[in-house]
Image (spheres, grey):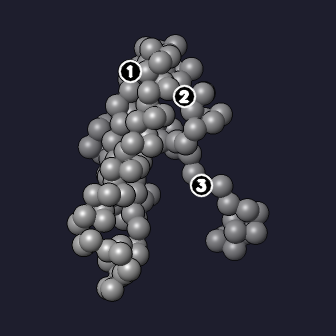
């Protein structure tokens, strides 16, 4: 299972998967706390809004999956609406029991990393 965005990490994981003839799962844990906000403008309902976001993210992930499939790598994509996202990733790992997990975290500025410490 691999969890990452496009770029250098994707290339490295693709190279590793190709060399090992491994299957790759691209997983994205998505959550938006503002979905449930009462009176949200333009809302069609919480369930519909969640489905819209999940479908959109899945199409994005499939684009990445197609790039890997073009390199003859077996790829599965999955999206889950889960909060908090880091726990959603752990739950996915427990469900799938992968041999290897690669995670790319969001970049933070030095100031933001320092403030969290």
Of mark 2 and mark 3, the one earlier in the sequence is 2
Viewer-nearest residue: 107 or 47: 47
Q: Which residue is mark 2?
A: 13
Residue 81: x and y in percent read 32, 58
Q: Quadrant of residue 33?
A: bottom left
Q: Residue 67: x and y, percent?
A: 50, 26
Residue under label 1, please give it: 74
Q: Is residue 1 visible?
A: no
Residue 111 to residue 60: above or below: below
Are the residues flagged by discs 3 and 1 in contact, CB closer than 8 Å?
A: no
Q: Which quadrant of the figure has residue 111? A: bottom right
What x and y, as percent, mark residue 43? 32, 74
Residue under pointer 3: 106
Q: Is residue 110 left or right of residue 20?
A: right
Q: Outermost residue toward the right?
A: 110
Question: Within 10 angstroms of label 1, few (less than 14), some, or many (20 or more) residues?
Answer: some
**Residue count near mark 2 (Cα–Cα under 10 Å), binned few <14, some 14–19, many ≥20:** some
Mark with earlier residue (3, 1): 1
Image quadrant where one finds the N terminus: top left
Task: Work out whether residue 117 or residue 66 is closer to the camera in this orientation and state it.
Answer: 66
Mark 2, secondary structure of its residue: helix
The disc, 2 or 1, on the residue closer to the chain's N-terminal end is 2
Left of 8 or right of it: where is 111? right
């Amino acid at each position: 299972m691999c969890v990452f965005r496009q770029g250098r990490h994707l290339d490295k994981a693709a190279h590793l998967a190709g060399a090992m003839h491994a299957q790759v799962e691209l997983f994205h844990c998505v959550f938006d706390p503002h979905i449930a906000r009462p009176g949200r403008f333009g809302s069609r309902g919480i369930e519909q809004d969640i489905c819209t976001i999940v479908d959109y993210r899945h199409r994005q992930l499939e684009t990445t999956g197609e790039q890997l499939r073009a390199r003859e790598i077996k790829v599965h994509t999955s999206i889950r609406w889960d909060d908090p996202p880091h726990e959603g990733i752990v739950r996915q790992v427990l469900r799938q029991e992968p041999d290897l997990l690669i995670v790319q975290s969001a970049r933070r500025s030095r100031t933001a990393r320092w403030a969290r410490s």
